[in-house]
Image: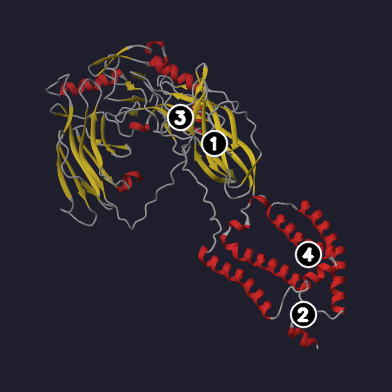
Amino acid sequence: MRVLHGFVSSLFLSGATIVSAASSWSFEDATVSVSSKGAGVGGGSKDKLSPSTPLQNSISLGATDTLKLLLTTAEGSTAKRPHQAFLTLADPTTGLEESFVLNVKDSGKAKVDLSHKDLPHQFLTCEKPIAASIVIASFGSSAPYKNKVFDLAITRDPNVPLGIPEPPVRYAAETEIHHIFREDPKSPPKLITIVFAAAVAGALPVLLGVWATLGANAGHLSKALGNATISHGLFYGSILAMEGIFFLYYTSWNLFQTLPAAAVVGFVAFLSGSRALTEVQERRLAELR
Amino acid sequence: MKKEGNILVALSSEHATPSAVQAMLLELDINTPTDKGALVVDHFNYDSTSASEQHDVLLLPFPAALRPDVKNYFAGEGYIAVPRAVCQTLGNESPLLSPILRAPSTAYSYNPKDEAEGVEDPFAVGGQLNLVSAMQANNAARLTVVGSAEMLQNKWFAEKAKLGDKAITTANRDFAQKLSAWTFKETGVLKVGKFLHYQDEGASKKMNTSVAIPENNPTIYRIKSDVHFQVEISEYMNDHLAPFVPSPNDNIQLEFSMLSPFQRLNLSPISQTANATIFGVGFKTPDQHGIFNFRINYRRPFVTNIDEKRQVTVRHFAHDEWPRSWQISGAWVWIGGIWVTILGWLAFVALWLYSAPSEKSVKKTQ
């Protein structure tokens, strides 16, 4: 391998007029042109490239356009064919790079054609212009050349869908998921509740008032208590106690506390109730009701 | 590799890669050039002492982190010499593959036996070339492919070299040590210690950072209750367990899942012991009852996988855990109705028992 290259380079060296160990690679007569399919001759743009300074304006490449880069590679000032002659495109945001090999003739004349179908899809969807640089280098001690020469702005027809493959699986932290809780049940506005609660509570005085106008009274209370003090007291008391048990069951008691208490109170109500109601019946029979 | 064995494959451009090795690498989606003797050259970063003409001894800085959220196990100072490397390209599909050392952007692979004066159809160019690549299987068995066997030789461990006009000493000893340490699981091995969760009953809702909590995890939680979770993770470093510190952009995540995750939360380090970091998070159980898992599934390039889970039951509210009816303002109308009914009933009983006949009713009965 070493021998082969030594031989080839010595061939070149013999043909070259200026041989310098410190010579460097570069290019000459570079033009970049963009031609559209339908535009015919003279359509599109054409720019001269300089090895030292990149082009001011970016070159735009549409969907049907073809970019053509023509240049002559040179070592020092001699046109010569290098081993490596690439057009390297680099996405400035992601750092993705793709190199296109220049087709170089022995005379150093090199060319490369680019169109959308040559580019990876990441470049086609790139927002910013892509930096295009030229790499010319070969074996031996000549300094290699790499410089940015122009910016390439890719323009796409937004109506043509692009077949972008699904991004492949990579192990990384996934997005956080926070459970979305169902909404708590809501109550109607308190004002409405209070108005209706007041209306319900107001029904009680109305009821008592209507009873009063119908002649309700407690006139026989002393008579009844006088006839059967214990049973009346116990009966009405047990009815009150039953309501109290229900209240306790509502607020704090469980069923097993409630049932025995209710049984006791119910038994009392049954015994005292039969006596008390007998007394009421006596009053009715005495035509006092 | 099925038995969790680790393999270091070293290729060399001076010997043809056996087709069996090539086929094995191809099965793992690692492509190597098929022609014998293909090697990587770079006319920009070569050692001008030993390869001034051929440019096939590359001098590269230590690799940077693969991604901002991946820990770099191969960082170091200085330059690595990669003499006459066989390159690899990695398939894009598998998450198990990762490049360790990439070629610089101006490098390319070619076959010196190729008679052509210029490179016409290179195997791959630039950063797509891997000089050292790695594969970690699902069972954490590791395979490292080193493109250049020479770079592991004593000759290159601390060789004087010249990059451009700069005289340097290669740091291959350091890189080879890191590479073999990683391949044979001396670094990048994670171990899970205590894995605990508990109901937060305190008012402050602060994480308990004490390391002395025993691992007696409850088996049942109620929906919508506050739960704290902690896990100890340590990393094996050459000869001891050290607290694991993930990359600053990375997060260890807890999933609280029934079939699919209901909560996926980033854990934050809450304290450290001598050889483990305690990561923790507090959260509310979702409003869905069922059998849930606390699951940590941590898979990243270059570290062994963590997949731990603990099952718990999440029950719904018991009958006495709901708010009482008087706390619900909408129920006040109905509660008022009940009270009115009770008072009306008591008044009615009293009237029925004790009411004296009024004039009207006497008339009526008459």
Which mark is in front, 2 or 4? 2
How far is mark 3 from mark 4, CA to CA? Answer: 76 Å
Q: Residue at x 50, y 46 (%)?
A: A178
Rendered image quadrant of residue A209:
bottom right
How far is mark 1 from mark 4, CA to CA? Answer: 70 Å
Looking at the rendered structure, whether the residues under marks 3 and 2 are on a common chain is answered as: yes
Tell me residue A12's x, y (percent): 19, 24
Residue beneath label 1, please? B297
Looking at the rendered structure, whether the residues under marks 2 and 4 are on a common chain is answered as: no
Disc 2 residue type (three-letter):
Pro
Residue A34, can we see it?
yes
Residue beneath label 4, please? A236
Residue beneath label 3, please? B246
For the residue pair A264 and B204, the one nearer the viewer reads as A264
Looking at the rendered structure, whether the residues under marks 3 and 4 are on a common chain is answered as: no
Disc 1 residue type (three-letter):
Asn
Which mark is in front, 3 or 1? 3
